[in-house]
Image (cartoon, helix red, strand yellow):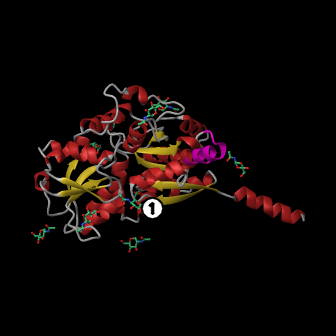
Amino acid sequence: MRFLALSLSVIAVCALDTLNYGAFTQTATYSIANQLGFFTAYELEVIYQQIPNSTFAYAEILNGGYDLLTGTLDNCVNLRFNSNKTVTVVGQLDQGTDLVLAATPNITSISQLRGKPLIVDSPVSGYAYLLRQVLSSYGLLLENNDYYFQTVGGTNLRYADLVAGKLPNGTTVYATILTYPFTAEGEGLSSAKRPNVLARISDFVNPVSSTALTVSQSSIGNSNKTNIITRFVAAMYAANLYLQDPTKKNCTLKAISRQLNVSSTVAQLEYTAATNNSSGEVGVGGNFTVNLQGALNIIGVRKKFGGFSSLSPDFDFTSALVPGHGKLIDYSIRDAAIKILKRDLLRTTC
Ligand SMILES: *[C@@H]1O[C@H](CO)[C@@H](O)[C@H](O)[C@H]1NC(C)=O
Ligand SMILES: *[C@@H]1O[C@H](CO)[C@@H](O)[C@H](O)[C@H]1NC(C)=O
Ligand SMILES: *[C@@H]1O[C@H](CO)[C@@H](O)[C@H](O)[C@H]1NC(C)=O
Ligand SMILES: *[C@@H]1O[C@H](CO)[C@@H](O)[C@H](O)[C@H]1NC(C)=O
Ligand SMILES: *[C@@H]1O[C@H](CO)[C@@H](O)[C@H](O)[C@H]1NC(C)=O
Ligand SMILES: *[C@@H]1O[C@H](CO)[C@@H](O)[C@H](O)[C@H]1NC(C)=O
Ligand SMILES: *[C@@H]1O[C@H](CO)[C@@H](O)[C@H](O)[C@H]1NC(C)=O
Ligand SMILES: *[C@@H]1O[C@H](CO)[C@@H](O)[C@H](O)[C@H]1NC(C)=O
Ligand SMILES: *[C@@H]1O[C@H](CO)[C@@H](O)[C@H](O)[C@H]1NC(C)=O
Ligand SMILES: *[C@@H]1O[C@H](CO)[C@@H](O)[C@H](O)[C@H]1NC(C)=O
């Protein structure tokens, strides 16, 4: 009996809590946390759920299908301010890493996009507004039908379609917006398949607050959920500090390469992009603080193209960005995660 009780308690100690993690892309920070065992160190089993499109993803976060997701901040801004949806940003992960307008090999200049479709997640998503900003600099306006949008889905689907040169229904693909890790993966392809980077978004809007750690407001204060999410954010925080440490470069490269199943050459390109201090995953104060200017910039672009038409013209975006309970940004989980940082993880070897 005593022996049985002992084995049961050992099992109980080892039991991992499950966190359903929705993500559009596998960031460098996630790759480190996952490959180097940081989630396990926080007694978590993280189930990576590939997000097919933003409509689906934000419904899942609100109905509890996902416990946390990483997606671009604009989605939360849109849902909060335009639709009163209680999505909450726990922190910012990146500033639009490797965010580019990419085209098929035949398209070598933005002017060639005249009359063509651009594939997007949603025509009213933040990335679609960023595309409108870039194309408008070349005199191409959506409202003049100089080009048009086709709704396809998240970045992974769009990258696959761009490389294939066509949608699953056979429609020719010309261009889309890409982000980490697909921009560098594209650079690793043979010249016949390699997408052309027509523009870097950071040359038009900079900084861009992009990937945000996002939860449902209802999971803050619900002690079990809050606890599990806090441990996830702590593991990601440790991984982000690891990413910032140049002496850990070789292990980081290995983690990226294994997570994405890419060559060491491509992993090096991914590393360079992720560690860029103005557009990567390390430029945000090192603790997931939202870059206020980056947030105001995406709000500005959305506003310019009518993406806040239902709001009063004197809506105060700056005060709506002030963090707090029940607000768009709530740092309570982030602050608790920093307090439970396991410093020994920062010395992990591989
Ligand atoms: C989004 O994904 C869901 C789930 O896969 C799918 O049912 C839906 O049709 C997709 N929506 C769009 C607009 O592609
Ligand atoms: C959102 O909620 C606020 C306060 O509860 C209310 O004044 C506003 O009309 C709501 N907006 C929408 C779009 O539902
Ligand atoms: C791309 O260019 C090649 C060679 O000029 C041509 O054969 C092909 O049809 C073009 N493809 C598209 C999708 O325009
Ligand atoms: C192919 O799919 C795209 C994206 O869903 C759609 O916009 C387009 O109309 C479809 N084309 C045909 C011929 O069905
Ligand atoms: C937390 O988990 C315990 C044990 O599984 C359960 O009894 C309790 O109801 C949960 N609390 C909340 C707030 O979900
Ligand atoms: C990283 O790997 C390179 C080449 O494999 C090696 O020369 C270098 O010493 C390693 N650096 C560290 C910090 O381990
Ligand atoms: C990893 O990539 C290689 C080469 O592209 C491929 O053969 C292999 O099937 C991939 N493995 C996985 C698990 O996707
Ligand atoms: C970092 O990214 C910015 C914006 O894309 C770019 O201008 C800069 O050259 C990059 N820095 C390095 C060191 O690659
Ligand atoms: C970012 O990196 C550049 C080039 O390495 C450096 O000059 C600059 O001081 C860094 N900026 C910050 C905010 O760390
Ligand atoms: C996060 O980093 C910023 C910038 O370095 C700093 O001002 C702030 O105090 C930090 N917050 C926490 C909770 O560590």
**Foreground residue among 177 and 243:** 177
- Measured as percent of width and height from the top left, residue 143 is found at 17, 45
- Measured as percent of width and height from the top left, residue 337 is found at 57, 40
Q: Which residue corresponds to the image point at 36% horizontal and 35% vertical from the top-left? A: 295
Quadrant of the displayed image that contains ligand 3: bottom left
Q: Is residue 328 magenta?
A: no
Q: Is residue 226 magenta?
A: yes
Q: Which residue corresponds to the image point at 13% horizontal and 46% vertical from the top-left? A: 144
The amino acid type of the residue labelled 1 equals: Gln
Q: Which quarter of the picture shows residue 276?
A: top left
**255 relative position to 41: left or right:** left
| Mark 1 residue CB less than 8 A from any atom of ligand 7 | no
- Magenta: main secondary structure equals helix
Total of numbered circles in the picture? 1
Residue identifier under label 1: 259
- Magenta range is 221-232
**Foreground residue among 245 and 339:** 339
Note whether residue 249 is visible: no
Q: Which residue corresponds to the image point at 33% horizontal and 43% vertical from the top-left? A: 279
Q: Which residue corresponds to the image point at 26% horizontal and 50% vertical from the top-left? A: 100
**114 relative position to 49: left or right:** left
Q: Residues within 10 Å of mark 1 (few under 14, many from 20)?
A: some
